[in-house]
Amino acid sequence: MSQGYPPKIIETKWQKVWEKQKLFSAQEDPTRSKYYLLEMFPYPSGRIHMGHVRNYTIGDVVARFKRMKGFNVLHPMGWDAFGMPAENAAIQNKTHPAEWTDSNMESMREQLKKMGFSYDWNREVATCKPEYYRWEQKFFLEMWKKGLAYRKHSLVNWCEICQTVLANEQVEQGLCWRCDSKVIQKPLEQWFFKITAYAEELLKETCKLKGWPEKVLIMQREWIGKSTGATVFFQVENREEKIEIFTTRPDTLYGVTFLSLAPEHPLLNKLITDPQKKKEIEDFRKKTAAVDREKRLADQYEKEGLFLGIHVIHPLTGARVPLYVANFVLMEYGTGAVMAVPAHDQRDFDFAKKYQIPVKEVILPVGARCNVPLQQAYIDPGILIDSAQFTGMPSEEAKKAIVKYLEEKKFGQETVTCKLRDWGISRQRYWGTPIPIIHCDVCGLLPVPEKDLPVVLPLDVKITGEGGSPLARHAAFVNTTCPQCHQSARRETDTMDTFVESSWYFLRYCSGNYLKGPFDPKDVDYWMRNSPSPQPSPVQGEGENILKKFPSPLVGEGQGEGEGVDQYIGGIEHAVLHLLYSRFFTKVLRDLGYIKISEPFQNLLTQGMVIKDGAKMSKSKGNVVDPNYLIDKYGADTARLFSLFAAPPEKDLDWNDQGVEGSYRFLNRVWNLVDELIQKQFLVSISEENFKTLQKKHHQTLKKVGEDLEKFRFNTAIAAIMEFINVLQELIQSSTSGLPSPPLKNLTRNLILMLSPLTPHFAEELWEKLGNKTSVSLEKWPEFDPSALVSDTQKIVVQVNGKLRGQIETHTGAPEAEVKAAALADSKVKSYLEGKKIVKVIYVPGKLLNLVIKP
């Protein structure tokens, strides 16, 4: 590499200065507007990767820019420190998860500091520490008292490799999100958070999140999956039991030819008594459990079923309808039972053909004269046929009429439901927050008394990798005394899903090391309320209207707008998992009286991935670029500059070694240019005319860079600075007469200020070279002069009979006569006027001159 600025020396130097002076320590200041900037905190895996570098560089630029704009900025960092990877690493490396995690946090903290990120490290949070998770246990107990936390027997997603339960959101294409092994369905007693109690509010308030990308809002709405339809009751023939189904197509009710139950439906154990049939059902359950859950959801598998030898009675026709157990019915959706209308549902159609079940058509396309044998299901709306008194009605009209009739006859009712299911938080692992519940054979389930919190995770646990939670084999932890009857009792050995910790960490940051509670409400009020309303940017989008409301009695009215973290930055892969859970948890804490806000994040930026050789950087793909290598060879500022310049933040970044080299060469070029100007004390030969051009470009650049940083257009901001450098060098080299130094020094000063958020160490050193005694990080953002942007000349379009014939340049504000004279003198225009008489002149000042001539 060519000689230039010494990144290793200056980066270490300024990192020490920042830390010693505590430049980025945030304190409440009522004289300034606050700005809470947060990137999603990392899992302490041991080293940062280029995804981290890109994410945190974006956030750091915004934080530094906002400080320079006068905001009181909170920019914290911490660790999402619990989770299965620590246990897996403990098994592989024969070390304790706590030691492994602490060591990784120390290593990654050092790497982040080497990147020059302006974090307030005094507020650092590690979710695996008792001083953090004790409050999470308190939240759990309060939720339990309110009915928002509960335990039930449930079919769960089970990872055999990790030996733990997974939430639906943690199953990706049928595989465990952590280890990529196949996920199966397994019945277990589990703890749940009642997120469904907040489904309506979570859905409704997406329309208030105007600072969120529309694609994220759509993903959340689809996951909640609100549907309006009807609940219908089918009486089991010669039995007391009724089967409840939910349908969004009550207009097809007269076309029902069979009913299907999920293999896990609890009614099966009541209805089936024959041992042989019981065995068949159990075998069918096992076979179904082995099917990819994602394939079941996507219908990408062969539909199979088993006739139960039982019929139900159609509520409207009295017909006997056969009852099946079917692998395409999921217990977790709806009621675990579906009415099958083969003529108007393709899945039902395929199943009916396979098992020779009748297909009854009850909807015809509008305008169709008669029905013909179906080759596939007709799923669109139409006109009802063979549907008693509803025959002849359009589908939408019939839906309402049939639901009303069901309610009158007490056979069913209008129902609004959603796909969202309660959040299963039980994990059969060690490295997580202990669930603060005691099991007593006499008293049942009891909360751990608040005075006994936290229930500390014991460190003397042997991690073997065998099935079940290691806590269950730790006698000193398990064995306790019932707080009510004082007899021997057992502690709960499941720990909480790691997403619980990340659902409220942003609140903890507001109070740093607060000891009297999870956070100080006054601090939360300051940092997460009373800020300007979110401003949509080109990488964000506005929400859409939400349809019909359904009851949510446990929740209050939320605010939504103008509250929460001012800017949140993280990957699109967390659109459902983390973001939805954080929104839910914020509303719960509001209703428990801890906070006054309803939404955690005002504005959201989802950055793209870092791609190399056509694939996301990954150790398994062997295409990883080590950030330490970049820092050692080029310096942190080069790594920052490249990650910002290579692509807009919301797009994927294609790694390019030449691009890194180019960023380094640019910094060397700027360094040498500024160094040369300083050495010459800015007494550089430059003409007044050239300096005038340079001043105009200077203020254009100030305007452009300020606007682009405000809207996260980092790549175009850097491009504008590069263009300014080109003009500066070219004009200095081509000028002939002298100019006093102060104006040129001011231009250089503002150049360094523009670079400061982007390449902070580089800017600090050049700022000091200019003779400044204070940190550039404390300077205000330079303002452009609007008057300097006004041009001395204007370009006028010239038309002849309305057709473009030329373009002329005159001084700004030239009168019509002068503009006309210049147009008539233009050779191109003159060629269209020869021998012609001008009968009219139309002049739009500063823009257009139209000469009307006789044909």
Image (cartoon, rainbow, N blue to C red):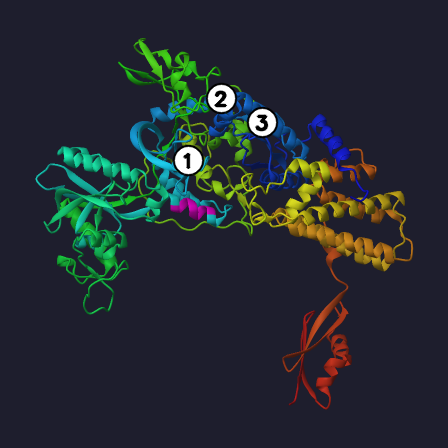
Left or right, residue 514 beside residue 229? right
Is residue 207 at least partly visible in the picture? no
Residues at marks 3 and 1 touching, judged by CB atoms closer than 8 Å: no
Residue at the right extreme, as displayed:
737
Three-letter code for the amino acid on which mark 3 is drawn: Asn
Left or right, residue 5 beside residue 117? right
Say which of 784 and 827 sits in front.
827
Q: Position of residue 825 (x, y in %)?
A: 78, 80
Binning the other alpha carbons within 10 Å of mark 1 as few (below 14), some (14 to 19) or many (20 upward) gives many
Disc 3 marks which residue? Answer: 104
Quarter occupied by the N terminus: top right
Residues at marks 1 and 2 touching, judged by CB atoms closer than 8 Å: no
Three-letter code for the amino acid on which mark 1 is drawn: Phe
Q: Earlier in the sequence, mark 3 or mark 2?
A: 3
Is residue 286 at least partly visible in the picture? yes
Quarter occupied by the C terminus: bottom right
Q: Position of residue 48 (x, y in %)?
A: 60, 34
SS state under label 2: loop
The secondary structure that dominates the magenta segment is helix
Disc 2 marks which residue? Answer: 517
SS state under label 3: helix
Q: Position of residue 783 (x, y in %)?
A: 72, 47
Q: Report if residue 217 lies within the magenta region.
A: yes
Q: Give the spatial CA distance, label 3 vs label 2.
A: 28 Å
- Against 298, residue 129 (above or below) is above
Q: Report if residue 805 lies within the magenta region.
A: no
Disc 1 marks which residue? Answer: 584
**First to last magenta residue range:** 216-222
